[in-house]
Image: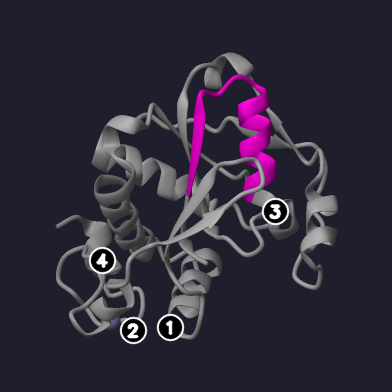
Amino acid sequence: MTLYDLIFPPMCPYCGELTGDVRESCERCAKLLEAEPHKTPLDCGAVCWSVFIYGDSTQKAILDYKYRRRKQSGKSFALTLTRIIEEYIGRDNIDLITGVPAKKDYSGSRFDQVMFLMKRLTKITGIPNRQTLMLTRKKQFQHSLNKDERRENVKGLFRVILPDDVKDKRILLIDDVVTTGATLDSCAEELLNSGAKSVVCLTLAW
Ligand SMILES: [Zn+2]
């Protein structure tokens, strides 16, 4: 156990119960993670796997992680994402892990919740990670937009930083939540247009 674990003891991301070591959840909350992951088809042909429905305790868990920077939750989430990779996507089918770039709307917070997950996934799986996408402009708030408006809102928003990094790679694209899929679709399309061999997306919630 590290000093960090003493100050921030491992706990269930969903209910806060102390778990002693880093786990996906406490026993009581394990049912939240029981269901088969959900598959959202994206317009570009890629698929997004998601672990659970965004609601009540799972929403609170993600918001606590994101805005209260509860890194212990990120460690638990990374275990869950790793399980999905191993059981459904296949570790051998991924060359590179990347993420949807930080939302500039939330500047002021230096904690990048997607980057943290990417790093944890690399630590657990050994698959390398790299930030391959950048925002070309400040991202507008999407919450009140419908699917078409969201698609328009993210058009041209993402750009691959160095096409050589993604060329011929089978890429796993990470985000915390998928809603309409417009953001992930825009990122995946940009990766594919830049030479990626394939893209599969993975989020915690849908
Ligand atoms: Zn729990």
| Residue at x 50% of width, y 30% of height | 198
Between label 1 and label 2, give the one nearer the viewer.
Answer: 1
Secondary-structure class at tag 4 = loop
Image quadrant of residue 1? bottom left
Instruction: Find residue 57 and name its label.
Output: 1
Instruction: Find residue 182 and name its label.
Output: 3
The answer to whether residue 102 is visible is no
Colouring:
one colour
Image quadrant of residue 166? top right
Q: Give the amino acid type for the residue marked by disc 2 in the picture.
A: Cys
The answer to whether residue 141 is visible is yes
126 w.r.t. 49: above or below: above
Left or right: 110 as drawn, with respect to 76: right
| Residue at x 60% of width, y 19% of height | 195
Q: CA distance from mark 3 to mark 4?
A: 28 Å
Can you give x and y, in whole percent of width and height, for residue 24 in the image?
A: 26, 66
**Highlighted magenta segment, given as a residue range:** 184-201
Secondary-structure class at tag 2 = loop
Which is more N-terminal, label 1 or label 4? 4
78 w.r.t. 185: above or below: below
Which is more N-terminal, label 2 or label 4? 2
The answer to whether residue 191 is magenta is yes
Q: CA distance from mark 1 to mark 2?
A: 7 Å
Q: How many tags in the picture?
A: 4
* Number of residues whose C-alpha sits closer than 10 Å to that of mark 2, classed few (under 14), some (14–19) or many (20 or more): some
Between label 3 and label 4, give the one nearer the viewer.
Answer: 3
> Is the CB atom of the residue marked by disc 1 within 8 angstroms of ligand 1's nearest atom?
yes
Instruction: Find residue 24 and name its label.
Output: 4
